[in-house]
Amino acid sequence: MDSLRTYLDHFVADTLDRCTRCGKCYEACPMTSYAPALAGVSPPSVVEGLLPLLRGGQGTDEAVAWVKICTQSSRCTEACPEGINAMLMVRVARMGALGSLGGEAQMQATEDPLFFRKIEAFAATQLTAEEIEQWHRASPRERTAS
């Protein structure tokens, strides 16, 4: 059985080889409108800035902002024309941004130990596809009011 590090190394090499830096994964992310640092950025440039994080390198501020807001919706994976597990790509980039891959930390871990548990609880509400689409079309202000 391969170690986690061997698996990650293979995943990273494969991702870096196949990723065309098109930005479709970023465009599909439902969370980017909630990060002021991401307003008006180029999706391909965010992806380009994220890729060094996969090897523990320095990512761009925009890439780290994207990593911070990832809720693991998997819309990025569905959008990837190359068939890359983009959700895992962002998760590994988060490991890099936290300094867990040997590089310098570029962000701190979330203060809320229940953050991902809350995301899971929200996902478990089992919204219909139509309800999810309506939620995505609503403005951030409308979403927080509901």
Image (tube, rainbow, N blue to C red):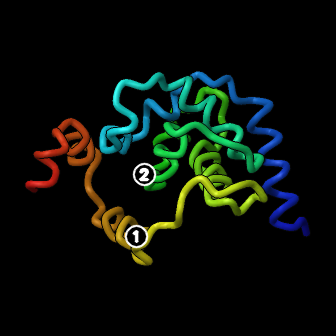
Specify whether 15 is left or right of 120. Answer: right
Quarter of the image for residue 136 reads: top left
Which residue is pictured at 34% across the width and 30% down the height? 39
Residue picked out by circle 2: 69
Q: Secondary structure at mark 1?
A: helix
**Compared with residue 135, is residue 23 higher up or lower down, i.e. above or below?**
above
Q: Amino acid at mark 2?
A: Ile
Which residue is pictured at 60% across the width and 42% down the height? 86
Q: Alpha-carbon neighbours of circle 1 within 10 Å: few (<14), some, or many (≥20)?
A: few
The mark that comes first in sequence, 2 or 1, is: 2
Q: Return the mark for residue 1.
A: none
Q: Position of residue 29 (x, y in %)?
A: 42, 39
Q: Secondary structure at mark 2?
A: helix
Specify whether 79 is left or right of 97. Answer: left
Q: Alpha-carbon neighbours of circle 2 within 10 Å: few (<14), some, or many (≥20)?
A: some
Residue picked out by circle 1: 115
Q: Amino acid at mark 1?
A: Phe
| Quadrant for the C terminus in the image | bottom left
Callouts 2 and 1 close, C-beta under 8 Å: no
Which residue is pictured at 68% across the width and 37% down the height? 51
Which residue is pictured at 40% across the width and 74% down the height? 112
Quarter of the image for residue 8 reads: bottom right
| Quadrant for the N terminus in the image | bottom right
